[in-house]
């Protein structure tokens, strides 16, 4: 803990890099998974194939992916984009499964009512289904965000890892305090970001608070 306080500026610099390497892939995953997941939701065979491919992609070892991407894409080994691309693959693989599941949680009666009102498929998905699917979707986004924050540390093995650099440097110097500082910083960052997403979800879905309050009142009655 003492090392962490004495070297706060160094840790803060690594934290900024760690956030960049964690959040950019998450945003890329969302930009890909939301439209893809929405399109494949009602086509069973396409959905099955897409989810199978996503499952295979997520099982690829992260370190192997970090090492092979430079050769595939043509980037320098120490380019941070290698980590961004690898984690974007993982984020997309997880989220492309989460989006259809979140849309499935929308009550059929609501979807049926939107169709009866003449909503097109696109308009219904954007204005009705996706907003109502937010509670389930945000829960999955929280998982992906924390997973990314953890996996970024693996990139330190090839010299790109944000806070993971504290692990490799501490190991090379045989200095446990630096390793513990890295563990504490990553756990703290994951908890803070998870809490921020939880609060964002609560902010975007006020109806969930209303339904919870109504349930509590009925239980007391």
Image: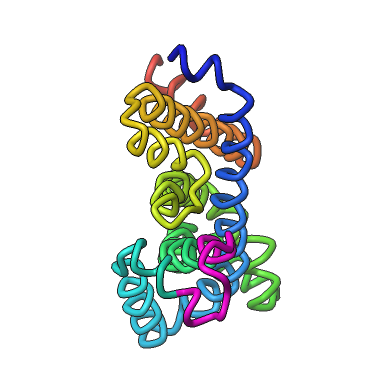
Q: In the rendered view, how is the structure colored? A: rainbow
Q: Give the tally of numbered discs.
A: 0
**Residue occupying the point 46% across, 19% down:** 217
Q: Tell me which secondary structure the magenta stretch mostly adopts.
A: helix
Q: Is residue 38 above or below residue 209?
A: below
- Furthest toward the top, the residue is 2
Compared across the picture, whether 37 is left or right of 117 comes to left
Q: Is residue 185 above or below residue 111?
A: above
**Residue occupying the point 43% across, 21% down:** 216
Q: Is residue 186 above or below residue 162?
A: above
Observer able to see residue 108: no
Question: Front-most of 30 and 14?
Answer: 14
**Residue occupying the point 47% across, 29% down:** 185
Question: Front-most of 172 and 149?
Answer: 172
Quadrant of the snapshot with the C terminus: top left
Quadrant of the snapshot with the N terminus: top left
Observer able to see residue 214: yes
Compared across the picture, whether 149 is left or right of 129 comes to left
Q: Position of residue 191 (x, y in %)?
A: 47, 30
Q: Is residue 83 above or below residue 134?
A: below
**Residue occupying the point 36% across, 25% down:** 180
Question: The magenta stretch spans which residues?
Answer: 69-84
Question: Front-most of 115 and 47?
Answer: 47
- Furthest toward the bottom, the residue is 45
> Could you say which quadrant of the image residue 52 lies in?
bottom left
Compared across the picture, whether 34 is left or right of 150 comes to right
> Could you say which quadrant of the image residue 114 lies in?
bottom right
Q: Position of residue 84 (x, y in %)?
A: 55, 61
Would residue 79 be counted in the magenta stretch? Answer: yes
Q: Position of residue 181 (x, y in %)?
A: 43, 25
Q: Position of residue 90 (x, y in %)?
A: 43, 64
Would residue 118 be counted in the magenta stretch? Answer: no
């Amino acid at each position: 803990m003492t090392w962490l306080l004495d070297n706060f500026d160094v840790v803060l610099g690594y934290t900024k890099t760690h956030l960049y390497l964690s959040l950019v892939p998450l945003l890329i995953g969302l930009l890909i998974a939301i439209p893809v997941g929405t399109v494949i939701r009602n086509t069973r065979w396409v959905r099955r194939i897409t989810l199978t491919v996503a499952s295979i992609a997520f099982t690829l070892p992260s370190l192997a992916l970090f090492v092979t991407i430079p050769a595939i894409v043509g980037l320098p080994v120490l380019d941070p984009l290698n980590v961004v691309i690898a984690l974007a693959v993982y984020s997309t693989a997880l989220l492309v499964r989460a989006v259809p599941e979140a849309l499935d949680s929308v009550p059929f009666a609501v979807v049926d009512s939107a169709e009866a009102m003449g909503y097109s498929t696109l308009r219904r998905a954007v204005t009705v289904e996706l907003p109502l699917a937010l509670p389930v979707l945000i829960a999955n986004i929280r998982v992906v965000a924390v997973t990314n924050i953890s996996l970024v540390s693996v990139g330190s093995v090839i010299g790109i890892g944000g806070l993971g650099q504290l692990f490799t440097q501490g190991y090379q110097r045989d200095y446990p305090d630096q390793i513990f500082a890295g563990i504490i910083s990553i756990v703290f960052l994951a908890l803070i970001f998870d809490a921020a997403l939880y609060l964002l979800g609560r902010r975007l879905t006020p109806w969930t608070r209303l339904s919870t309050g109504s349930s509590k009142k009925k239980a007391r009655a």
